[in-house]
Image (spheres, helix red, strand yellow):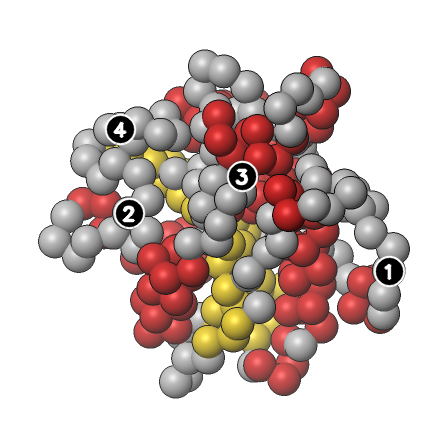
Amino acid sequence: MRVFRPARSNGRAILAIPGGAYTFVSIRNEGTDVARVFTEMGYTVFVLVYRLPGEGWADRANVPLQDAQRAMRLIKSKAAGFDFALENVSVIGFSAGGHLAASLITGGLEKTYEPRDMADKLDPIPSCAALIYPVISAEPPFTHQQSAQMLLGASPSIEAIAKRSPALHVGQQTPPTFIVHALNDEPVPYQNSLLYLEAMRKANRPVEIHLFEEGGHGFGIGPSNATAGQWPQLCGAFISRHSQA
């Protein structure tokens, strides 16, 4: 992880999870650019560089979630030293990183690794989440095939697909979630976000969605002169509404 500190803390932190189709980690536009914008708003931002499932790990489908769980626990363990409240740590995930963030908020209590230290006693579920053009479906017709195949392998079982389909696991403990997608996103169709929206509505959990006419895929923080560039401020307002005092 890389940490970016604000000039003046607002008492909140964010774990930013870049995308990259589970083949690489898009650090600049979905990591450091995000940190720049949100530190200006007072957040302490941690950018996660997670392991990739195709790097030869034995348990490929769990490797990214292991890193997200461990990162969230470490962030919470350092809350006092970085001047934010342990109860006010959110996650923002992009594309495949949005799938990872959605997996964290719906399946973060899974035991995916053996505890290493006292930090692993902490709850890895964030207080709030933002999913930015997320991959949600792990199967056709709406999935991003490369992301799904890199995570699950070429011929995953029905059970493996279901386990890593986060919309199927939304429940009463799923934190408030903010969702952004562009209607002209071709690699990851906006229906992915609608799947998650409907799951949150069915579970009666707090959710907000913004569907922009333009933006395509991978716009990161978005251009400041286009509508998609409004999402960081909208997201900040959503987190503020759902944060502990």
Q: Is residue 44 or residue 18 the one in the foreground?
A: 18
**10 Å crowding of disc 1: few (<14), some (14-19), many (20+):** few
Q: Is residue 25 or residue 119 the one in the foreground?
A: 25
Can you tell which mark lies on residue 219?
2
Residue at 23% x, 45% y is 228
Pick out the residue farthest to the front.
Answer: 56
Amino acid tagged 4: Leu
Q: Is residue 118 or residue 143 the one in the foreground?
A: 143
Q: Is residue 194 left or right of residue 102?
A: left
Do tag 1 and tag 4 residues touch (Cβ < 8 Å)?
no
Residue 225 in view in this figure: yes
**10 Å crowding of disc 3: few (<14), some (14-19), many (20+):** many
Whichever of callouts 4 and 3 sits on the residue coming sooner in the sequence is 3
The CA span between labels 4 and 2 is 13 Å
Q: Secondary structure at mark 4?
A: loop
Can you tell which mark lies on residue 115?
1
The N terminus - image quarter: bottom right
Q: Secondary structure at mark 2?
A: loop
Image location (x, y in percent) of residue 202: 56, 23
> In the rendered image, which residue does mark 4 sit on?
183
Whichever of callouts 1 and 4 sits on the residue coming sooner in the sequence is 1
**10 Å crowding of disc 2: few (<14), some (14-19), many (20+):** some
Q: Is residue 215 left or right of residue 52?
A: left
> In the rendered image, which residue does mark 3 sit on?
99
